[in-house]
Amino acid sequence: MYYKNSTYKVFYGFNIFLLLLVSVLCVLPILHIFAVSLSGKSAAEGNLVTFIPIGFNLDSYTETLKNGNFVGAIRISVLRAIIGTGLSMLVTVLTAFPLSRNSREFAPRNRYVWFFLIIMIFHAGLIPHYLLIQKIHLIGSFWVYILPHLLSVWNVILMMNFFRTIPKELDEAAIVDGASSFRILGSVYLPISMPAIATISLFSMVGHWNNWFDGMLYMRSPEQWPLATLLQTIVVALDLSKAGINYEDLQQLSNRSLKAAQIFIAMLPILAVYPFLQRYFVKGMVLGAVKE
């Protein structure tokens, strides 16, 4: 067999080594951030921390969780990720299912496909988009985080291609039993499509969680910002005036430790969700890649 071949064994060993190396390179920055967040002020400011905390304390986490702006930003981001991902998947599935039919089953299919491809390639730009958001009165509203991101054409294409790999015999059997289109979608297609749904849901959730520009562009006050916008202001723009931080407390803490604690807390929700989707993720990565 091919897997007993010495060349294959060398190739397999090299792959294992490469994947372990990449895994270590991904984990080490997280360990460093975690160690800095637990370290004392002098060690953190002196850049002495590597992967083990020096002067262990939880002051940075205590100060972070006392920060009303930070806790409010977490709440907004969690609501945005849950509501946005749920509604986005609903719209994506309802759009992809009819587009996965052929022209005999859904006559205007080709026109819709061309329409989505054109709007995927050509974009009006930021100013027309802002004017549209302003005209429909979404400035300053929580729904500005949700509605403009409901439909991703790329996600629709992925979902449509996965639906098209499902055997037509299942369709025909359901039709013979008298099932409607919605019943076929809910009882036949969705249970089979969990790898695709989990993968696209993860993409959508990460996109919502990491999107910082919407809050800065459309919201009038820092209290309405999601966590990504608040972190961008604190960590990247180095503007602490809108972070809700008490300067007297900040003098007793390391600025680097405080930022590290906030970054680590921001990573936790996605790190916690991923293991539950991981078993679907490998299958979902090749969705629509194989045709019969």
Image (cartoon, helix red, strand yellow):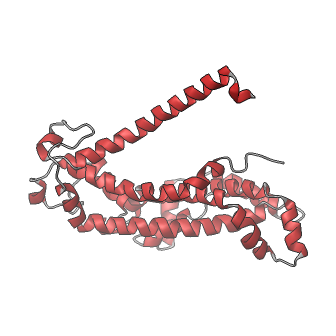
Left or right of 134? Residue 89 is: right
The answer to whether residue 290 is above or below residue 65 is: above
Identity of the residue drawn at 69% across and 68% down: 94
Q: Position of residue 170 (x, y in %)?
A: 84, 65
Q: Position of residue 125 (x, y in %)?
A: 53, 53
Q: For the N terminus, which image quadrant?
A: top right
Compared to residue 255, the image places residue 46 above or below, namely above
Residue at the image position 69 percent from the left and 52 percent from the top? 118
Q: Is residue 117 visible?
A: yes
Q: Position of residue 175 (x, y in %)?
A: 88, 73
Q: Residue at x 13, y 52 (%)?
A: 253
Q: Residue at x 32, y 57 (%)?
A: 265
Q: State the residue in front, 139 or 72.
A: 72
Q: Specify whether 111 is left or right of 259.
A: right
| Count of marks, rendered view | 0
Residue toward you, 9 or 276: 9
The image quadrant of residue 199 is: bottom right
Identify the residue at the far top of this view.
Answer: 6
